[in-house]
Each structure stands twice: as structure tokens, then as C-alpha cells.
Amino acid sequence: MQAPFEHIPGELVKVQNATLHVVERPARTATHLPPSVLIHGKFGSVHDFLDTSLVDLLTSQQKVLIVDRPGCGYSRLPADTPATLETQVALLAALLAHRNVEPAVLVGHSLGASLALALAVAYPERVAGLVLLAPYAIPGDGPAHARVASILQMPILGAALLPLVWGLIRLAVTPMFTAAFKPDPLPTHYTRYIRGVVLRPEPFRADLQSVLSADRLLRQIYPAFTDLHKPVVIMTGTADRTAPAERQSHPLAAILPRVMTIEIPDAGHMLPYTVAPNIAGAVLATAAAANLLARAPHTHATQAS
């Protein structure tokens, strides 16, 4: 019998020293909108978008690229290359150039929003706009298990403890993600998906490395957020306790020069699963705004308050 999620959608693409898992969907109608790139969060994969209606809604008007963050899902890094956000930013930028999908609207969920922001700061010419879903972007408010990740980085102790931590988290999948989806219900397939794709040993370790590196990178790029003159939409759920708006979305919106914040009443952290039509509307509007701004490149000198 075929194992769950044994079939890998899309393709494996060689980018520099990495192999990236990419799913590309063409636009069904010819438009001039820039493409979108969908970036999953912690303990996620391309399935966090493919298993929703979001991709179908977006491809009505634009090309969409969905990618497993380097080291995560079915993307692979060399054994001696840690899956830090810095590494992921460089590889994703190279992928955009390789696939000719730049400038693109980056759609990042949770930790994927950290990656999207970092890419926009480092490679602004490759980014048309940002849609940040339940973002983790303000350093210093990261998950407590980042401390576990730091232990797992230790050469001898980390190698010994990784199987134990991996096993414990596999056992805790249902309550852990029930809390992330709350107040929405956990999808019936979700535990099977997480165990079958995300919590395999290699992507699990890569995800912890990403978490560990997040605050360091965010502290480095935080001062540059005020100079990020791209159209940005921040979408957050009022019931999100994983990345609460008052600690993440609100302070982020306060420092970005061209931003719109959308709050979804009674929505939790897993917005791609629960409010895909809202996200699609925000992404397509951001793509249209990016087109307008591209025709008036000097408008950043006179920002609306």
C-alpha cells in the first residue's frame, strides 16, 4: 500500500548546492500581474497552500510558485549547510532568478513572513510586494522551543537528543496544532500530513535550525523595515495566540511605510486553511498595486500618512 503523501507534487530543482521542491502553477487568464511566491511557516510545507483553495483562486489571474523552504518539506540542503534563514533567503532569491518569476509578490505565513521580509530587504529588486499572514517579524518574541533548537545544534549532545525530541513532538502533534488552528477545528488529515511530510527527521532538524536563526536575522534587518517601500498587506486573526497581533502585526505595521493591516475576527494562526478567499483578494490587490507603483517609481518620496 502506498504510504501517505508518498507522491511529491511539482518538481525538484537544483539551485546552487541545494535541491528545492517547487510547485509552479500558470495563470489561467493572461494578465499583467506579477507572479506570487508562497512561503510556508514553521513545521509546514507546500501542502499548507496546495491543500486549500488559495492556489486555484490566485491562478485565475497570476502565475504562482509554491516552494518548500530550503531544508524543509522535500527541499534538501547539503549535510554541512545549516537551514538558517540567511541560507534560505539566498537560495530563494536564486530560485526566483532561475525561474524568471521576479519581481514577485511574496506571500509568507508565520516564519515564512520572516523569510519574505528578509528577502525584500536583501533583494528589493526581486520583490514587487509582500502579503504577510500571521507574521513572525518582531525579534525577541519567538517560541520557547528555540532553546531546544540551540541544544540540538551542539555537535555531540544535539545528535544524541534529536531522536528523543523528534519523537516527543511527533506524539504531541495533535494538541500542538489544535492550539495553532484554534478556534478553528484541526483538519481531519492534518496529523497524518505533519507526520508523513513535515516531521521526518531531516526537515524537522532544518525547521529547528530556521527557528533558531530567526531572531538573529530579524534583529539585523529590523532597522531596514522603515525603508521598505513596497506595498505590504499584513493579515492577522484576532484569536491568534501563536503570533498575537499586539506583539507582532501591530508593531510591524507601525514601522512599515506602505502597509495595510487586515484583521480577521475570531481567526487563529493557520490563515491559509481558514480564510483562503480573503488572502487571495489581498494578494491580487497587492499585485495590482505593485504594477501601479512600478509605473511611478519615485512615489516613495511622498508617502501617505
Image (spheres, grey):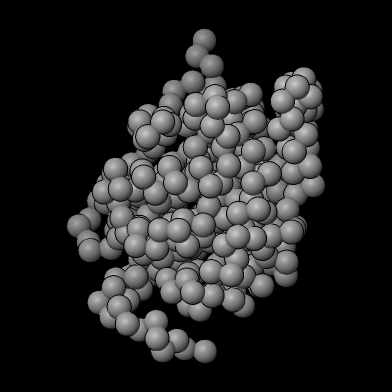
Q: Residue at x 50, y 14 (%)?
A: 2
Q: Is residue 48 left or right of residue 149?
A: left
Q: Residue at x 75, y 26 (%)?
A: 158
Q: Position of residue 211 (x, y in %)?
A: 66, 44
Q: Is residue 131 left or right of residue 266?
A: left
Q: Is residue 277 shown to the viewer in this render?
A: no
Q: Residue at x 60, y 51 (%)?
A: 111
Q: Position of residue 154 (x, y in %)?
A: 74, 30
Q: Position of residue 109 (x, y in %)?
A: 56, 53
Question: Image quarter for residue 15?
Answer: top left
Q: Is residue 31 shown to the viewer in this render?
A: yes
Q: Is residue 196 above or below residue 129?
A: above
Q: Is residue 252 left or right of residue 59?
A: right
Q: Quick one: 304 or 240, which is closer to the camera? A: 304
Q: Position of residue 151 (x, y in %)?
A: 78, 34
Q: Quick one: 299 or 269, which is closer to the camera? A: 299
Q: Is residue 144 above or below residue 230?
A: above
Furthest toward the top, the residue is 1
